[in-house]
Image (spheres, grey):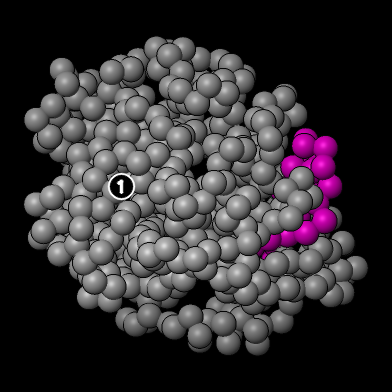
Amino acid sequence: MSATRMLAVDFGASGGKCFSGTLESGRFTMEEVHRFAHEGVSLFLADRKGTLEERTVWDDTYLYQQILKGIQAYRRVCGQKLDSIGIDTWGADGHLLSADGDLLGKVYCYRDHRLDRMVEQVKQRIDARRVYEITGIHFQPFNVSNQLLWLAQNRPGLFGDGVFYLPIPSLFYHYLGGVHSVDSTWASVTQLMDARTRQWSGEILNALGIPATVMPEIVAPGTVVGRLHEPLARLVGVDPARLVAVAAHDTASAFAAAPVSDPARSLIISSGTWSLVGKLVAQPITSPAAMAANISNEGGIGNTRFLKNCMGMWLVQELRRGWAVADGKEMSWKEMDRITLEAPLSTAWIDPDHASFYNPANMEQAMIECCRKTDQQAPKDRGGMIRMVYESLALKYRFVNEQIDAVSGSTTTAVHIVGGGSKNIMLNQCAADVLGLPVYAGPEEATAVGNFMIQAMGLGLIGSMQEAQPVIRQAFPIREFKPVDTARWNPVYDRFKQVCLKPG
């Protein structure tokens, strides 16, 4: 059998990567061919009333250009033959386009402050309990439900004849091949999709005043949705590859790549800018207890991701960014690891998901202020600040795991950490110690691995994600972190819950 060659495009909220992947005779290999950083850009613009507002947007044309550079890099490494392309992205944001294909404004970033109070606006339009019953998604400011309601309220003129909305991964499929669909994993996180029918909920769209006609078709992961435009394929020097709707929500792809043997007893943490902490379950769980715990039911590959969005490496990324501004140069990750290892065990902790850390002007000052408000002594140096973040993340993992166990009725016996954060040895060991469970780390590029496996499904090479597990295990070594000195963390955890997780 000839080798099948694929390209995976993986956009995170702070960077992107393109990988070549080859599947031949049941063996899989992949190679990074292009990597880049990106971030939201803040503009200060006055509205029609003269009110100056900060608006945070993405540069979608820059991101599209990076896809083209990734394809060109693939061409240099692998040649012209390209069978398929799959794109995954972060799980929020999108764009309105006119019937003539014009972009109707900038692509807003999910951290834009226009969304700060939109959750309450949604709840005023439709009962919160009803929203959760239908969608299984808890309330977060970045939900697409909030974003489209904001547009309906504040930019109603944009919803003209023929206008259509494209979620962020669909926007890039549109640029590459004119595709107007989205897969069910990404649609599920919008808080607009019925979790059981996997179609847009007319009840919610009507309540929010969002025209159903603007929404794209929802397709199953693994669906071939189009081909690379022929003129574009000629321009970048590859075959007009098939475009496969993978699990376009990056967490869905990452969860799919976790090499779990017992889903009911395996906690999966997709660790990156965000930490997505959850389990794979057969059906959505939308009980009052699940809603009270703010656990979401996100679409998977033949299952449901029962999880919580927790803040992740964003906290450290923002510390690093602030220090770069202060120093005039950026501290290397190697140096940050060194000073963190040298720092003593923390005596102060934070709730990583406190609202003050969502998008502060200065992350370090926000953490110092949080310690002050909780009567704790903030760390005195940068290494201590980073260690406090890692310990606090591990403590929050334990808290979320207890919630998920209680609501799902299954007890966790192992933790799988996938994604870029799985390279963080200190955080992995801290998680093992705090949870008192073995931690299995890898694959590091789990999102791209899941992306490739679903492309292979779409091409008919793999029948299911279960069939993909041996392929994944063969290709990627998994590191184990055994718990050590777990007893010391029990009083710390009790204090963490009392001090850091109290209301307000």
Q: Does the magenta stretch include residue 407?
A: yes
- Quadrant where the C terminus sits is top right
Q: Which residue is drawn at 59% across and 28% down?
A: 136
Where on the picture, by quarter, is residue 219? Answer: top left
242 shown above or below 134: below
- Quadrant where the N terminus sits is bottom left
Q: Which residue is drawn at 61% across and 70% down?
A: 474
Nearer-the-camera pick, 272 or 476 = 476
Q: Position of residue 413 (x, y in %)?
A: 82, 56
Q: In the orientation shown, which residue stands out farthest toward the right? A: 487
Nearer-the-camera pick, 491 or 370 = 491
Residue that numbered label 1 is attached to: 243
Nearer-the-camera pick, 19 or 347 = 19
Q: Which residue is drawn at 38% across and 80% down?
A: 330
Can I make out residue 355 in this image?
no
| Magenta residues, start to end | 389-417
Nearer-the-camera pick, 178 or 432 = 178
Can I make out residue 9 in this image?
yes
User: Could you tell whether 110 is left or right of 72 in the image?
Assistant: right
Q: Where is residue 118 in the image (x, y as percent from the top left)?
A: 43, 29
396 shown above or below 34: above
Residue kind at label 1, given as amino acid type: Leu
Q: Main secondary structure of the magenta part?
A: helix
Q: Position of residue 367 (x, y in %)?
A: 56, 62
User: Could you tell whether 200 is left or right of 101 in the image?
Assistant: right
Q: Is residue 224 magenta?
A: no
Where on the picture, by quarter, is residue 234? Answer: bottom left
Q: Position of residue 106 (x, y in %)?
A: 20, 43
Q: Which residue is drawn at 54% across and 37% down?
A: 299
